Every structure is written in structure tokens, then in C-alpha cells.
Image (cartoon, rainbow, N blue to C red):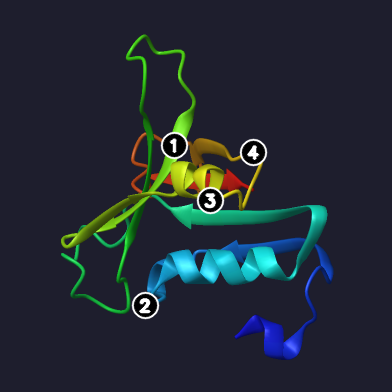
Amino acid sequence: ELRRCFPRNHFDLVLMRNALDHAMDPLLGIRRMLDVTRPGGWVLLRHARNEGSPGMFQVGLHQWSFDALRLGAGDGTSALHFLVWNPTLRADVTMWLLDEGLASEVRTQLRPHPGASGGADEAEGEYIFVDI
């Protein structure tokens, strides 16, 4: 529990890279990160896209996969939504954060893997960048 270690509104920036997909409850983890972030600050999530899927959520500690999909109008102009899912649950985190008033903005992007060299044999995949 972050609040045992840090007071509410303590940090300007909270960063989590490729770790939240190992949590039992990633939504609770996000909520706790937001608790210790000051108003106007940022929670930045950087995770490999759908990393739990290849091992069918049974290899290692990957409990969840993270994805980014365009949900809405279907005309290609809607923003990417941040999704957390496994075989038993799928959550649109973007809508949850906005609907619950936990965030006023959620920016989601797909980017090349940070270790990608750009070669033709590149197999690292994509990363999900989420700024809350």
C-alpha cells in the first residue's frame, strides 16, 4: 500500500514500467498511484503490449495483458483506449478513470518496444504508453 509509505498528493510524477501486469489487481494499483500523485501531476504507465497472452497467463508472473484499441465512432478519429484484460476480465481503463472522476485526461499511445533496433527481424513488439 503506497499510502503507508507516502502521503497523499506527494509526487509530481509516478512511473511504472512493465510491472503492473504482474499485479493481482492492476486497477487498484493505478488508483493507489493516483492517490500519491499531486493534482496536476502525472502517472505514466509503460508496458509491453499483450505480454501475458503468449504464455496464456500461465508462464511467469504475467496475470494481465494490456492493449490499446480505438473504441467509439468507428471512423478512425476516436482516441485509443487503454484496456487491461485476461481470460476472465476485460476492463476499459480509460472509461473507468474518466467515469469515476479519477482522471480528467488519459492519453494512450502505441510505440515501438524501447529496445527495438528497427531491423527486419525485430520481434519485440509494441509498448503501451499511458499518461494519466
Give the Cα distance between marks 3 and 2: 21 Å
Residue 37 placed where, x, y %? 76, 64
Give the Cα distance between marks 1 and 4: 11 Å
Return the residue at label 4.
Answer: 105
Res 19 visible: no
Q: Which mark is residue 81?
A: 1
Q: Secondary structure at mark 1?
A: strand
Q: Nearer the viewer, mark 4 or mark 3?
A: 3
Return the residue at label 2.
Answer: 24
Q: Nearer the viewer, mark 1 or mark 4?
A: 4
Asked whether 13 or 56 is in front, the reply is 13
Res 118 visible: yes
Residue at the far bottom in the pictured view: 4
**Amino acid type at image mark 3:** Glu
Give the Cα distance between marks 4 and 3: 12 Å
Mark 2 Cα-neighbour bin, 10 Å: few <14, some 14–19, many ≥20:
few
Q: Which mark is residue 100?
A: 3
